[in-house]
Each structure stands twice: as C-alpha cells, then as structure tokens.
Amino acid sequence: MKLFTTALRGTGLVALAALGLLASCNKSNEEVELSTPPLSVGHPVNNSAPIGGPIKGTMQQDLEYNVTADVFVNAGDTLVIQPGVKVNFLGNFNFIIKGTLLSLGSQAKPVYFRAKNATTNTVVAHTDQVSADPATDPAYQGLWGGILGDVTCPLMVLKWTHVEFGGGTVVVSPVSAGIANNKNTYPIFFQNPLGAFILEDSWVYGATDDPIRVLGGRIQVMRNTFEKGGKTGGESLNIKSGTTGNIAYNLFVGTATNGSKASNNGGKNPQTNIYMYNNTYIHCGFRRNSAGRGGSINYEEGSRGVYYNNLMVNCKYGPRVVGSGNYLGNVLVVADTANLRYGYSLNYVDSLALANEIYPTAFLTKPQATDIPLPSSWLPAGYRLGQVYTAPQSLLRANNPQFVNFPLPAPVRRLADVNTVGTYNFHLLASSPALGKGYTGFQPLATSPAIPVNANFGATAITLPSRDLGAYPSDNSGNQH
C-alpha cells in the first residue's frame, strides 16, 4: 500500500488546490471539466546530465533523458514516467526494474524508449521501406538492451509507450535474474508470477529475438502494435509458465516466428492460461527458417486458453496447436488441448504454400465450422488433423478482409518483404467479410487476483470481445493506432 499512498499524496494536494481555485473563480456554478495532472511520485529525476545507476521518483513531462549506463529501480522504489518523456539510450544499456515502473504516456504525448547515436547525437530512425535487409536494418541490431523486470518487480505498466531498437547483447550481466552474458536480451522482460504486467496502446518496434518475453505474471496486453519482431527468430509475445491473462486487439506485422505464443514451459505456477482474441496478424513467420515454425498463433507445452476472432493475412502458418510428441525428429510437448477453445478465424492467403498450412501439417489444430474460409468447402474428404493436403486454387485471394489501406493481393515477389506498418491502415471497409463474424459469448480471462482498472496502477480498459474480427472493429473500440 505504500506505493498507492505515496501516489495519492502526490496528486491529492494538486487536486485540492485546483478545486479550491475553481470554487473561488466559478461564480456561475456551471460544470467545468478539469484536466487531470500527470501522476507524480517522490522527487523529479534530474535530466541535466546523463542518467545511470539507481533512480526513483518522476521523469517529468516532455523532458529528454540520455542513458549512458544501466539504470536500476530498486526493490520497494517506484519510477513514474510522465507523458512526452523521451528516454534516449546512447549505447547498449538497460532499464532494470526491481521495484515498480509506471510509464504513463498519452495518445497526444507518448513516451519513447529509443536509440540515439552517441557520435552524431541523432535519434535512430525507422527503416520503413519494403524488403529492408534484416542483416543491415537497425531494427534487428539491438542498439540498446531492454526494460528488464526482475523477479521482485510487482508491477510494470506501459501505456502509450514506444519501445524501439532494443534487444542488445548483454556484455556484463546486469543484476537481473534470467539474463545471461553474451546473449541477446528482450526489449521488454517480465518474470514475477505474483506480479502484474500491463502493456496497452503501445508500439514495439524491432528486436533481435523476442520483443517481449514473460516468465510468469498476470498480464493485460491490449491494443498494441508489434512491428519487425525478431531478426531470424522470436515471437513478438513469448509467454511461459506462471502466466495468465489476455492478449487482445493487437496488430502484429512482420514477426520472425509467431505473433503470439503461449507455453507452460518453465515449471512455475499457475498453469499458463492465455486468451488471445481480436488480433490481426500480417505477413508473420518468414524469418524463421525451421520447418513447422512461425506464423500467427501458437499454443504448446501444456498451455491452455482460448483464441477467437483473429484475422490472419499471408502468414506462413495458421494457428498452431501442438498435439504430437514428435515433429520432424524434434520432441514437442503438447498443449492442454482439453482446455483449449478456439474458432471464428479469418485466414487470407496469396500463396498455395500458405493455403496448404492454414491448418498446419503435423499439428493438432482442429478446423472449425466458424472459420473463414469454411473448412468443409475445401479440405479433402476424410481430412485427418495434421495431414498433408493440397488446397484448391480457388482459395487464393478469397475472403479479402478489405483493409482501408493495405494492398491485397500483396504487390511483392516475396511475402517476407512486408514487415513494416508504414502508412498502411488496417481498419476494415464497410464491405469487409470480417464484419459481424465474431464471437462475443465469452468474457476476457479474469486473473486471480484481478488486475485493477485504473488510470495509473492498472489497465485503463479491458476491452471486451467484438462481433467483428481483428484488431480494428467497426465501433472503434479496439486498436487506436
């Protein structure tokens, strides 16, 4: 409770002063909407010199902070980052969170964690052209480390926050469990099964491996955009044992392997239970060369949950449910298929190779009568789960989701070349076959204990399932990017 008391103390005096001023000036008693000041705790963090070492308090609105050494938020301490803050990493350094991190950007003033060239003093820019070479694209080079939640981190909240160019190689292991020398870290890392991780309305750009890895915790990952996740491998969201929560209304573009993966690997409690609904996956899975790996959604190794209302376009594989102990000589651990429910998916493809993996070969994904295209209209008679099949030509370019601005059929020779959002708009036209095809007969997973809905210390909103497919429903309740 110390964290909450401190926060309320910091904002309460400001609020009371504002109310007093209103009472003295507003003689006509009409209603006046007051703007809420950004949360502030402790002392302001000084930006007059580069930062490194232990910090706490408040990084103040609209200021820039240059990082020239690993930054630590110690156990029991809190760091608040106000709207408009820009955190510039001038080298391969990390934010190591043993206490609480609250990055509270706004739609008008996002927070940025980004790379800055120490020699030229310029911010590293996105490379948004189609077919950028992963060997040279700065998105995949790991220009700084990551936001690393330690096992003692009770709460990590990132709202309207851009995390760009992270995933650098650890040279001197920071004081954080789960990070090894000479390995790439993750731009965002959370690992406290008793803690809470909230990522909403944010943007994660680039990584050398998984952009986000979670080794336990209660999570809400909603309305985010994931772009260029992983160089030659990595899931944009790699979830391990001890994790429960929701992944919804996210846009995944050009992920190396899967957009989102749930696994119960790691031996932590509780069992991994993840609800993935109303997400959009675009051109995922092509930088992972391993057979059977990469694509859109993945459940494996004892994980459970649901996935409904998802929209996939030109992904290497459709949703992958691991249901066999052996695949091409690799020993695999099956998902908790008895406690996995799914359906109401739309899968659009421009290639027969992709059409032949809408239901991935050698896996246990069950065709559902609610899927688009309707499985019974094109799968061979007597189809057995995981068998090799040959899809008909009529499946190509069928069920175009009709985005506002994204060309289909794909105007590229290699589907792998589309890995950036750029100026594309993934909202749906009024004639889209994805409208009205969703399933709303379930609720988001209620974690135990529940993640609070709170402007600062919890989720701003836990968006319910939509009757439309994908991350951009017609009522504009989903992804805001």
Image (tube, rainbow, N blue to C red):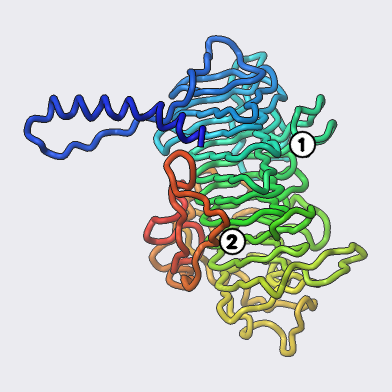
Furthest-left residue in this view: 28
Instruction: Tell me which amino acid carries mark 1.
Output: Ala
Mark 1, mark 2: which one is toward the viewer? 1
Residue 276: mark = 2
**Residue 319 lies in quadrant:** bottom right
**Residue 334 lies in quadrant:** bottom right
Residue at 56% across, 64% down: 310
Residue 415 in view: no
For label 1, the crowd category at 10 Å Cα-Cα, with few meaning under 14, some 14 to 19 and many 20 or more, is few
Residue 391: mark = none
Q: What element carries label 2?
A: strand
Residue 470 in percent (x, y) is at: 51, 61
* Spatial separation of the CA atoms under disc 1 and disc 2: 28 Å
For label 2, the crowd category at 10 Å Cα-Cα, with few meaning under 14, some 14 to 19 and many 20 or more, is many
- Between 411 and 452, the one lying in front of the other is 452
Q: Do the residues labelled 1 and 2 touch (CB within 8 Å)?
A: no
Furthest-right residue in this view: 329
Q: What element carries label 1?
A: loop
Residue 160 in percent (x, y) is at: 48, 39
In the picture shown, does residue 223 fall above or below 457? below
Instruction: Tell me which amino acid carries mark 2.
Output: Met
Residue 251 in percent (x, y) is at: 55, 52
- Between 260 and 79, the one lying in front of the other is 79
Residue 84 in view: yes
Residue at 69% across, 55% down: 258
Residue 102 in percent (x, y) is at: 52, 34
Residue highlighted by disc 1: 177
**Residue 265 lies in quadrant:** bottom right
In the picture shown, does residue 395 fall above or below 480? below
User: Is 24 left, or right, of 305 in this rendering?
Assistant: left
Residue at 59% across, 56% down: 245
